[in-house]
């Protein structure tokens, strides 16, 4: 799976948009971009994923650059409960296995 | 989203004893489950891939005789930490792969093991 690079930490004001960047310059054509987050002492929570088109769901938006070498997760109106470690992962979706390898992620702190 | 449940959420045991952690997919069947461990302030480290009806595949450096994995049904995988020692104290997390769609993974709540 392609390696990803994320800033170790970010801060955001409550109610503002949080934009979390991820670089994946070695991504292959058949690799998806996945985002998960982990609130302290809990299991990771799936947020969103995409291949090349921008995606949006009830939690967030995912913007993938045209060359697919980077992406941005957007939390449109961050709340205190969004404070967590956010992981950007790229992986091939196989018929079996589908391993997820976690990097160090970005610690997002939402401040009141 | 799909629900994955782990039990127990916390366990404290004496050194030398064995501890079993269960991972269940509650509303879907999972032919493949994954086990991770996580140390404080560190990322998740994949330990093994558990396949229903066959032997687990362990990552390099993970002792298969130490961490026994059984995936006897499409909704249950278990991790047994045998002869636990204090260095085995960690946060253990399982995940199950959704077969449909693009196969996203859903994670359990985690099990915190403390070995005294």
Image (cartoon, coloured by chain):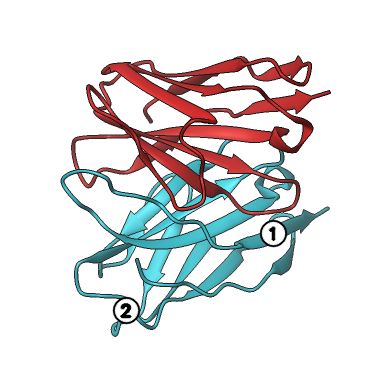
Chain colours: A cyan, B red
Q: Quadrant of the C terminus of chain B?
A: top right
Residue drawn at 70 percent across, 50 percent down: A83
Q: Is residue A77 visible?
A: no
Residue A13, placed above or below residue B50: below
Q: Secondary structure at mark 2?
A: loop
Q: Nearer the viewer, residue B41 or B4?
A: B41
Residue A4: percent from left, percent from top: 47, 72
Residue drawn at 26 percent across, 66 percent down: A31
Relative to B85, is A65 on the left or the right?
A: left
Residue B18: percent from left, percent from top: 62, 16
Residue B82, placed above or below residue B34: above
Q: Secondary structure at mark 1?
A: strand
Output the chain of dot 1.
Answer: A
Residue A33, placed above or below residue A37: below
Q: Is residue B47 visible?
A: yes
Residue A5: percent from left, percent from top: 53, 75
Report which residue position mark 1 lands on: A108
Report which residue position mark 2 lands on: A68
Instruction: Residue B50: name its quadrant.
Output: top left
């Amino acid at each position: 799976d392609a390696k990803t690079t994320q800033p170790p930490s970010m801060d955001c004001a409550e109610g503002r948009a949080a934009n979390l960047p991820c670089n994946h310059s070695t991504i292959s054509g058949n690799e998806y971009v996945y985002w998960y987050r982990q609130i302290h002492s809990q299991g990771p929570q799936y947020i969103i994923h995409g291949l090349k088109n921008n995606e949006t769901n009830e939690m967030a938006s995912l913007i993938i650059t045209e060359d697919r070498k980077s992406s941005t997760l957007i939390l449109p109106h961050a709340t205190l409960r969004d404070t967590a470690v956010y992981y950007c992962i790229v992986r091939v979706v196989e018929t079996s296995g589908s391993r997820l390898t976690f990097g160090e992620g970005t610690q997002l702190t939402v401040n009141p | 989203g799909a629900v994955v449940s782990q039990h127990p959420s916390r366990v404290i045991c004496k050194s030398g004893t064995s501890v079993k952690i269960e991972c269940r997919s509650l509303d879907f069947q999972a032919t493949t489950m994954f086990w991770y461990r996580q140390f404080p302030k560190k990322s998740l480290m994949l330990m093994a891939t558990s396949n229903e009806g066959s032997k687990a595949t362990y990552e390099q450096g993970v002792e298969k005789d130490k961490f026994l994995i059984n995936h006897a049904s499409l909704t249950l995988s278990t991790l047994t930490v045998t002869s636990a020692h204090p260095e085995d104290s960690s946060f253990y997390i399982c995940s199950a792969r959704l077969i449909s769609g693009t196969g996203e993974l859903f994670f359990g709540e985690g099990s915190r093991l403390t070995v005294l």
